Image: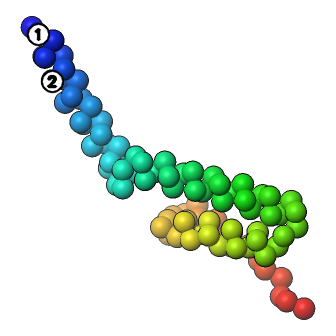
Amino acid sequence: MTLQTGVRIYQFVRDRLDDQRDEQHPHGHEAYVDAWRKAASLSQDHANAVASEDTAEAERVLQELYGMADEWKHHPDYPAAPAVPPVA
């Protein structure tokens, strides 16, 4: 038994774990992290716009979030768009 035996089995296990990650996140982990950060930032921007009563910005950010969610629009938990009152 040598140090290389442990290294080889570690590399094998790591590669299989990477395969599982890539199956769950087909664009890779970095793309997943970037998308997560973008969604979190948009959520915060939406909250800030609502708090400051900037309805135009809140709507713009909300539409961007819906654009990100479109990938899963057929998922049963997809959030329905809010009812928008008619313009007077």
Residue 45 lies, in percent from the top left, at 72, 59
Q: Residue at x 51, y 55 (%)?
A: 35
| Horizontal and vertical percent position of residue 77 | 58, 60
Q: Amino acid at mark 1?
A: Thr
Using the image, tell me which numbered label, if any, was put on residue 8: 2
Query: Is residue 25 rendered to the left or right of residue 59?
Result: left
Q: Which residue is mark 1?
A: 2
Q: Residue at x 58, y 56 (%)?
A: 38
Say which amino acid is labelled 2: Arg
Q: Residues within 10 Å of mark 1 (few under 14, many from 20)?
A: few
Which image quadrant is residue 57 in? bottom right
- Residue 7 spot, x, y in % from top left: 19, 20
The answer to whether residue 73 is visible is no
Residue 61's image quarter? bottom right
Quadrant location of the N terminus? top left
Quick one: SS at disc 2?
helix
Task: Name the residue rendered at 13%, 17% in the picture.
Answer: 4
Q: Is residue 78 left or right of residue 84?
A: left
Q: What colour scheme was applied to this rendering of the protein? A: rainbow
Judge by depth and name the residue closer to the eye, 56 or 73. Answer: 56
Task: Point out the residue furthest to the top here.
Answer: 1
Q: Residue furthest left?
A: 1
- Name the residue rendered at 13%, 16% in the picture: 5
- 63 w.r.t. 3: above or below: below
In the structure shown, which secondary structural element does the residue marked by tag 1 occupy?
loop
